Image (cartoon, rainbow, N blue to C red):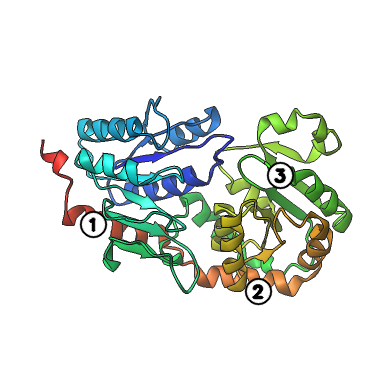
Amino acid sequence: MIFRCDATKETGLGHLSRCLALAEAFQDLGHESHFAGHYDGAWAAGILAAGFPIIEWDEITGSQGDAVALASHARALGVHDIVADDYRIDGVWLECLHGQGWMPILFDDFGRLPDYGACRGIINFGVGDKRPPYPGLPEAQILYGPRYFPARRELAAVRTTRPGRAEQQDVNKVLVTLGGRDRHGILWPLLRALSRVAPKAAIRAIVPPDVIRSTQANPFQDRLVAFTPSMADHFVWADACISGGGLTKYECAYIGLPVAILAKTSDEQMDTAVFATNNLGYDLGGFAEPDRLEEMLEVFIREADLRRALTQNGLDHFPPDSPLNAARSVLSWANMSLSPSIFG
């Protein structure tokens, strides 16, 4: 497989994390993977440390040149399939890749495109009763639901260590990880509100390095930690998490870490509403409601029964072998119809 995804301070770590998780599952089943994309230094090191080679990449994500280069590398490496994960991918990109003889597998959370006929299949690990439409794809080519959640190996290990902490009454350690760039400036109001609600708790906020160097960070320097390729140690440390509206909330549910969610986009807010309706996370109301932060945090921090329910529901919804479920299904698609470019 070739995975096409990015991990920068703009995109955050989520797209890379779920691709790495699927690549690890392929590896467990005896299959190799390569990564192509734009990766900031620490995250590039994380890919290499996980045992996957990186293809040097200069193309603009989502451009036709991006698709042509990807097809060329896939053909040269003799891979069976391409997995892509980026919101900038559109129908033109898909058709360009298809014209080169490749039908990629997409991580696709929202079903925005009018036609998915140029895809091999879709992975969407959402928890809602109704999945987005994917016109042009048969039902058998769509993996939907938490049984296909791509959790990294290290998270499976964390999951086994956490359940005993669900009985804990107090929150003594709070992890804050909003992901990507904080375009709405919500981090500082959040940290101030959290300090008032839980004055005795240790707070650890995972942020880009440039945030630590900013003047606004001065009152919080002892609570800020630079982004790292792995979140496992932070998850083990925490009693509770406050996350953005992306992948991290799913990771928390998978390992049984109670999570409160502060969505940063309208798409994230819709996904978070469904997540909270299924009692998998606590919705803090999104970036548009900063005045309610303290009130909402108070409920999450003070109510132990709420946090216990979030922990149990997460463990019930997300099976421990979900990465292998996804990998086996994807490999079955590849075996059904190998790309014509493999044959020259």
- Left or right relative to 140: residue 133: right
Q: Distance between the residues labelled 1 and 3?
A: 41 Å
Q: Which amino acid does label 2 sit on?
A: Ala
Q: Distance between the residues labelled 3 and 2?
A: 31 Å
Q: Is residue 297 above or below residue 35?
A: below
Label 1–label 2 contact, CB within 8 A: no
Q: Tell me which label, 3 or 2, sits earlier in the chain.
A: 3
Query: x and y percent of residue 20 in the render?
Result: 43, 45
Q: Name the residue under label 1.
A: 333
Q: What residue type is labelled 1?
A: Trp
Q: What element carries label 3?
A: loop
Answer few, some or many: residues within 10 Å of disc 3's Cα (few below 14, many 20 plus, some between 14 and 19).
few
Query: x and y percent of residue 343 in the render?
Result: 10, 39
Task: Give 42 or 245, whichever is nearer the viewer.
Answer: 245
Query: x and y percent of residue 171 in the render?
Result: 78, 60
Q: Nearer the viewer, mark 1 or mark 2?
A: 1
- Left or right relative to 22: residue 177: right
Q: Distance between the residues labelled 1 and 2?
A: 37 Å
Q: Which of marks 1 and 3 is in front?
A: 3
Q: What element carries label 2?
A: helix
Label 1–label 3 contact, CB within 8 A: no
Disc sitting over residue 227 in the figure: none
Q: Which amino acid does label 3 sit on?
A: His
Q: Mark 3 points at which residue?
A: 184
Disc sitting over residue 309 in the figure: 2
Answer few, some or many: residues within 10 Å of disc 2's Cα (few below 14, many 20 plus, some between 14 and 19).
some
Task: Identify which residue is drawn at 79% across, 44% down.
Answer: 188
